[in-house]
Image (cartoon, rainbow, N blue to C red):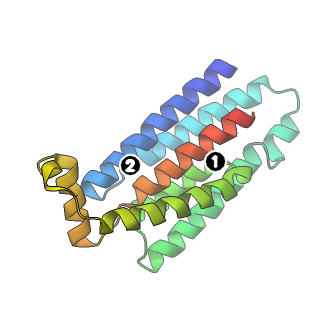
């Protein structure tokens, strides 16, 4: 059971990092990554159900699958609202669903706090000029493009807030 959860968590983390890298490079989060994250969560939830003694609690409690699905739907609704007001891209809005699944109901507050902190750090970092010694690196050139376009790849901030929250969630378990 524990090995399955660790593999699920590792695969989810790798998929989230790929989504962040894709958003950083092209301002796009592929639909396939979002669907793969949902499928990975479903595999983990199935493993959790198969090994539990209390199926009702695993399905319907805020600590179980019900809380995870509730968090995913709430974040997805928030993402769609932000997309409707053109504050978010569609990929960012879609990414909120699997993020909610993996952070769970009780991880919503830490996720929101890390998201806020990440947003503040990103906004401050984009205001600081890069030293010329690093100007030839591709990542630095991309940061300069982001700065010039004034479009923020929110998926990167969302993913790092998610990963920190997932680590905290699994340390408590």
Give the numbered dot on residue 9: none
Image quarter in which the C terminus is found = top right
- In this orientation, does residue 89 appear? no
Q: Residues within 10 Å of mark 2 (few under 14, many from 20)?
A: many
**Residue 64 lies in what quarter of the image?**
top right
Quadrant housing residue 58: top right
> Of 91 and 172, which appears nearest the observer?
172
Earlier residue among tags 1 and 2: 2
For this view, does 46 lie left or right of residue 32? right
Relative horizontal placement of residue 168, taking residue 51 as reference (left or right): left
Who is closer to the viewer here, 151 or 99? 151
Quarter occupied by residue 71: bottom right
Badge number at residue 103:
1
Assign a secondary structure to mark 2.
helix
The N terminus: image quadrant: top right
Residue 124 image position (x, y, % from top left): 39, 66
Total number of numbered labels? 2
Picture layout, residue 71 above or below residue 7: below
Image coords of residue 158 (percent x, y): 48, 55
In the displayed orientation, state which residue is furthest to the bottom.
Answer: 85
Residue at 51 percent across and 36 percent down: it is 12
Q: Residue at x 35, y 66 (%)?
A: 152
- SS at mark 1 in the image: helix
Q: Position of residue 21 (x, y in %)?
A: 33, 46
Q: Which mark is residue 20?
A: 2
Q: Position of residue 130 (x, y in %)?
A: 22, 58
- Give the Cα separation between the discs numbered 1 and 2: 17 Å
Is residue 154 among the parts visible in the rendering?
A: yes
Give the residue displayed 62% in from the left and 22% down from the top.
Answer: 4
């Amino acid at each position: 059971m524990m090995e399955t959860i660790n593999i699920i968590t590792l695969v989810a983390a790798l998929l989230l990092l790929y989504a962040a890298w894709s958003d950083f490079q092209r301002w796009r989060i592929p639909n396939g990554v979002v669907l793969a994250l949902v499928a990975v969560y479903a595999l983990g939830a199935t493993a959790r159900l198969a090994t539990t003694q209390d199926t009702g609690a695993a399905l319907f409690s805020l600590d179980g699958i019900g809380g995870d699905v509730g968090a995913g739907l709430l974040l997805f609704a928030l993402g769609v609202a932000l997309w409707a007001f053109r504050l978010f891209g569609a990929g960012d809005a879609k990414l909120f669903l699997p993020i909610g699944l993996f952070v769970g109901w009780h991880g919503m507050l830490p996720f929101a706090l890390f998201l806020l902190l990440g947003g503040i750090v990103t906004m401050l970092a984009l205001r600081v000029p890069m030293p010329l010694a690093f100007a030839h690196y591709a990542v630095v050139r991309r940061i300069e493009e982001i700065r010039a376009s004034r479009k923020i790849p929110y998926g990167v901030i969302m993913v790092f807030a998610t990963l920190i929250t997932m680590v905290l969630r699994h340390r408590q378990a």
